[in-house]
Amino acid sequence: MVMAVGNRTFLAERVQLIFSDSWASLPINLINAGVVALVHRNVLPLHVPLIWFLFIASVVGLRVALYLWYRGAPVSEANAPVWARRLMVVLAVTGAGWGVGGIVVMSMAPPIYQVLIAFVLGGMAAGGMPSLSRIFTAYLVFAVPVLLPAIVYFAYQGTELNISVAVMGTLLLGFLLAMGRRQEANIVNYMRTAEENRNLVQDLRREIAEREQAETRLRSREHTLARAQRIAQMGSWEWDIVNDRITSSRENNRLFGRDRDAPPYSYDTVLQAVDPEDRERINEIIKNAVAEGRAYSCDYRIRLPDGGERVIFEQADITCDDDGRVVLVTGINLDITDRYRAQERLRGAMHEAEAASEAKSQFLANMSHELRTPLNAIIGYSEILKEDALERGEASFIPDLDRINVAGRHLLELINDVLDLSRIEAGRTELFLESVELLPFLDEVVVTVQPLVSANGNRFTLDCPADIGEICTDVTKLRQILFNLLSNAAKFTENGEIRLQVSRFTDAAKAGGAEWVRFAVSDTGIGIAPEDLETVFMAFERSEAGRASRYDGTGLGLAICRYYCEMMGGVISVESGAEKGSTFTVRLPPTVREDERAGGVRAE
Ligand code: ADP
């Protein structure tokens, strides 16, 4: 910023200039006074030129004294007016010394000598002008006393010659004063301009220094950004739509296999680098985004100049001008080749796994079906044989026939479970919804399981309010869930208590207060250790205690219960502890929703 020079008078600088030039004028003063004294030594009594010289020398001495004083205490902005005043006083005295001394000598000298003195005085007044007129008043108080006494003196003589000299002297004085005033104005102007220039240069230097610093900072930031881009394998670019000019960061150039400092290029150049299979799709995405003035992101494969391939994720934003026209697209490109390849491998592996799982389910479903036919024959014939044996009184066959029958039934149960599970896993299980009154439905369940439940000396209780109402669900699956839970309870409890509690409740935590029907099967049996609680719902998982040889089982019942529950939009949970009995709770919505009916659940 340029410092305001304003109306500064630069008095201090001008006083300084006058003082520094004084040295040169002082010897001239003495030489002039000496010449006048020498010239008059023969025409005037000797003491007159001597006194004259001493007088002028003492006046000059005054100026020397002032100069020495000045050197001891240099002038400053604050004391400049004081020094200017001192200077003026001394100059006025010097001028008056010359002027008065001059006419005194003149009055005694012959006319031709008078002209010489007049010439010397004129010279003194003129000679002082260049240096003293830096402060016009200082020159004025010097020049006027130098010349005025002589002018008055000549005019007073009255002769034509003398009056002519007086007029010429007056003209000279007037001219010198006019010049002096002009010079003062010029000097002040010059100093002002110089100061302004100095300020300008200073400001310029400061600006240059600031710009250099800013450039250094910018370079360092660019460097950091380039490093960050290199580490992240992410390039950036800007597409000037109007001129179809894309400027690209070094990392972006590297990603595309271009020279790091490659010059800007066009949109078509980028499209050419895109794999032909992706080109049209990408062109469509970008053109649409630009036409609609919105940000976009996409990924595509590019072909590198060396024949390699890279996968790029691109994300860009759009800048519009004041009229809403898209003028600039700014974006980043990320190298996602590794991620893309890993995903491709994963997709392939998942595809294979799904195909394998499908094949397994298919195989199981087929095998189970093929196994059931002969097995049913075995069970049926063992029962016929048992009846025959009883009729013929051959009791010794009966235990073996019972074993065949029990083993056959167990195997059939296992096959049925496997079949159910493989149907679920193959996604072939469907829901058949129907509404059913819960009380008669539960009575029927209890009648069926009663012999099983009381077999181990257990007591059974059904706890259900009379107004429980109806449920709209897949009744067969609900029945199977309750059979599984109740037969597990019976299996793992001896001389204990088994209870089936059914109730309706509203879930206050859910928005709108979802309605549920809860079926809780609790027993006082062997319970499940905490470490087994998480796995009992997984296929083929059995608790440590459940694996004990005295308990039959496949580890499939609870897995099937869970899948069926989820298919019907419900949840199943368990609370238990070793030797503390277990409570399995099933929550089902009173009406299965349409989407759940359609969706089904695939096994994990
Ligand atoms: P299975 O009963 O044929 O073994 P399930 O899937 O029905 O298979 O049960 C899995 C395991 O969970 C059982 O083997 C048993 O260890 C445990 N379990 C299930 N119900 C109970 C229960 N009421 N009391 C104790 N353990 C149970």
Image (spheres, rainbow, N blue to C red):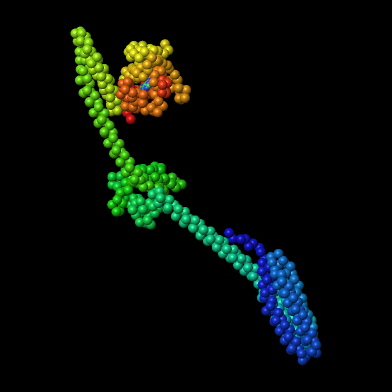
Q: Residue at x 28, y 24 (%)?
A: 418
Give x and y (percent) for residue 233: 38, 49
The quarter of the picture where residue 259 lies is: bottom left
Residue at point 40% right, 25% down? 529
Q: Is residue 18 left or right of residue 465?
A: right
Pick the residue in front: 444 or 247: 444
Q: Position of residue 61 (x, y in %)?
A: 75, 78
Question: Which quadrant would the C terminus be assigned to in this image?
Answer: top left
Residue 154, can we see it? Answer: no
Residue depicted at x 73% and y 77%:
64
Q: Quadrant of the N terminus?
A: bottom right
Left or right of 58 in this view: 197: left
Nearer to the camera, 481 or 455:
455
Outermost residue, bottom direction? 42
The spot of residue 374 in percent (x, y) is 20, 20
534 or 408, which lies in front? 408
User: Which percent across, then down, holds residue 471?
Assistant: 37, 17
The vertical placement of 17 against 602, above or below, is below
Q: Is residue 198 visible?
A: yes
Q: Residue at x 69, y 76 (%)?
A: 22
**Location of residue 205 (image quadrant):** bottom right
Ligand 1 lies in quarter:
top left
Name the outermost residue toward the front: 396
